[in-house]
Image (cartoon, rainbow, N blue to C red):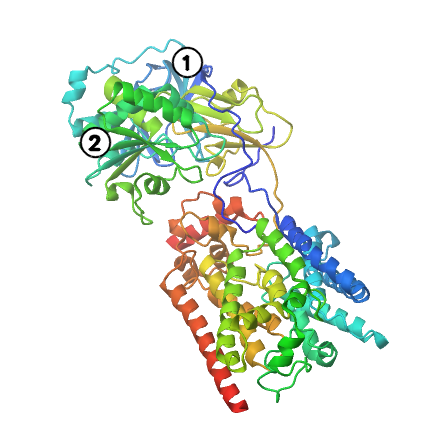
Amino acid sequence: MLFVKETSPHIRRKDSLRMMLLNVIIALAPVAIWAYIVYPLSALRILPLSVATCVLCEFLFVLITKKDPKAFTLENILSSVVTGLIYGLCLPPSLSWDNGVGYFVVVFGAAFGITIGKLVFGGIGSNIFNPAALGMIVVRIFWSSICKSDAGALGFIIMEPFDTSISVGATALSYPASLYGSVNMLDLFLGRVPGALGETFHIAILAGLVYLLVTRTIDWRVFVSYMGTFITLGLAAGIVALNKVGTNPLYFAAYQLLSGGVLFGAVFMVTDPVTGPIASPTRFIYGAFAAIMAAIIRLLGSYNEGVGLGVLLANMFACVLDNPKFSASRWNKKHLIVLGSEIGVALLIVVLTLCFKEGALK
Amino acid sequence: MIAKTKKIGGTDNLLSRRPAIPAPIPDFIYIAVNNARCPSADIFVKEGDHVNLCQVIGVRHGPFFDQPIHSTVSGTMVKIEKHYHRCGKLVDFMKIENDHLDTLDPSVVDRTPEQVEALTKDEMIQIIKDCACVGLGGSGFPTYIKLQTKEKIDHILINGIECEPYLDTDQRYMMDHAKEIIGGTMLLQKMYGVKDARICIKETHPEIINDLQAILDKHYKDSGITIAKMKNFYPQGWEVAMVKTALGIDMEPGKIPPMYGIMNVNVTTVASIYLAIWNNRPVTERYMSVNGNGINAPSNFVVRVGTPVINLVHAAGGYKGEEKKILIFGGPMMGAALPNEDCIATKTVTSLIVMNESKKPEAPCIRCGSCVLSCPQHLQPVLIMEAVKAMNKENIKALKPLNCMECGLCTYSCTSGIRVTDFVRRAKIIAKL
């Protein structure tokens, strides 16, 4: 009889990285299926292409670093499929396929995102940036004309009502009256508006959210703090800016929440554990930070999609939060001060800027 | 999965408090000369000498205490041999040939109730020292040192929680030896002049709670001993968690229960105190669970101290399956894996777990944070692991790895199957430098 000498403990919990990655794919499935039903041509081009690109890049990376094709495990495949799916679902369905531009855009973004965002740092678990968010942002910046042309697809721009001088995208929505007149909340919720491939189908995203929460694949703390902060800032902006033009702040906040990729980003991007901090209090701070960045960019900035950038900015912030001198598994004074002051400062920025901008406009 | 581990699942108790049957007493018994705490020893018997049951045959010298060695059978001293001790080291064992007569040493004399009543605290502690009572829950810490505390004791907690999976020893012991446990608790009450004593039992064992409660109600009505119901999570049996649940006191890391006026003793230890005071008898046999998915007939045994592992395996029907086996003394969460079968069950061994090897493939850490959520000491194991990998001494110290008591929950909870506890152990060594 042979004996194994190993250190304690000798039993393990029944879960695995594979299961976790598979759960994300399962949660993304309804969104992807809905995207296929609504935009069959685009979905069929974008999603397989981006997934294939990511898997190929991951395979080449494993081949180069480990010099052994057998080191390419199921985890590698699943992880790159997740990246490819999330990235693909963030792309606009109206990409132009003439002359192959669209194909190139999809492949370039996927390859750039997974390589620069993840593989150069060492692959699964070592990445600093969310690869899908990085790929999406790069594509949006490089091909801004293609990506913006689809009438506010990438989140209806809220700045336009106040500042028409900064005219980016979504030009149809220039004034509050037309903005709210043209968009029905139910349409927004059901995805009957133009938008990126996957981000407008809120029912599918919520189904994915429920699945992820039930299987404990994502940490509810990040999601709750993200949504909480985003709604708070949306309400504040609504109160400050829109009461003068006669709109309900609640309506404004709901509009903020349902337009663009907020929910998709909050469910599938911010909650990526690899690029976030490790402890519960810092996860609250992290989620709030990502939401603040997204809200500020959306409400005040000229760039029209804050969620992806907010995720990337928060990713950079995560290693600071993980500093052993700050990070702790229980709340302490430092955490409360940081969380309180970041939300406070964000409120101040949003409120003051909107006041002055509005004043300037009038 | 990003979740806190509360219960250890997947290991159904195969024993469910089966009666403890006496394991065959082997022809040769092995008594450890040294152990993890005591590096040196004097031996009082030579090869060929006759020894009695319970006879003092040597004394171990620890860093701040001495501990008599008792023979656990009567027979003839054969020689000194090397075998594996539960601490994983090869140490000297006295091999004693058993004559199966169990001739009792004349030093073992019962005390009358008057004599026991007349004993002072110091006399009792001396008796406990002479009988070599140690923490039988697995720690092996000399009981008399613990009892000698200068702090004022207000509460006595008797630990019958046994929160690790597969273990059944204390549960069965409480069913069979209520008299010894309650008697020992009363001795502790007398020793410290304390009325409040609580026997801590998990709420998931209503049979044991009801049994003990009935005995207390019937025979020990005014003893002041009560039963405290403990919650069903791991590590409830850890003294800090037990104190928290029983008394609501939060103990700071690095402090011990007597500093809060609490004396906590394991149920088996308290029964050994009873045996020492009333019968002047050291521990010669103990309850042991032989359990796990790698053994044919999981059983509870009454085992003579010094029985080799292989005898216990045979008594429990032998190994099940052809897979590689993991032999564990203690529970599967904190117990040490033995290098091979050539090990001896000493009196601090609570159980022998035989498990078939099951490999969880190791994947990269995805920073899910389950270890941080699960750590009962509120440490951040994943950050400790990163600091150890980076050899960042400053960060290692800032993360306070010395508070870790190696419950194993970080490795158990790891989604990626990483042995996080090993990194924390390394961090503890580095932090001490």
* Residue B347 disc label: none
- Residue at which label 2 appears: B195
Q: Are marks 1 and 2 on the same chain?
A: yes
Tell me if mark 2 has few (under 14), some (14-19) or many (20+) residues whose alpha carbon lies within 10 angstroms of its own: some
| Secondary element at tag 1 | strand
| Residue B258 drawn at (x, y percent) | 25, 41
| Residue A312 horizontal side relative to residue A95, left or right | left
Q: Chain of mark 1?
A: B
Residue contact at pointers 1 and 2, CB within 8 angstroms:
no
Q: Give the number of the mark in front: 1 or 2.
A: 2
Name the image quarter holding residue B101. Answer: top left
Screen quadrant of the C terminus of chain B: bottom left
* Residue B98 disc label: 1
| Residue B151 drawn at (x, y percent) | 20, 41
Q: CA distance from mark 1 to mark 2?
A: 44 Å
Q: Chain of mark 2?
A: B
Q: As rendered, which of A176 and B319 lies closer to the eye?
A: A176
Mark found first going from the N terminus, 1 or 2? 1
Give the residue type that dot 1 points to.
Asn
Q: As rendered, which of B293 and A268 lies closer to the eye?
A: A268
Residue at (73% x, 81% y) in the render: A145
Q: As rendered, which of A273 and A239 lies closer to the eye?
A: A239
Q: Is residue A242 above or below residue B134?
A: below
| Residue A176 horizontal side relative to residue A345, left or right | right
| Residue B50 drawn at (x, y percent) | 34, 13
| Secondary element at tag 2 | loop
Give the residue type that dot 2 points to.
Lys
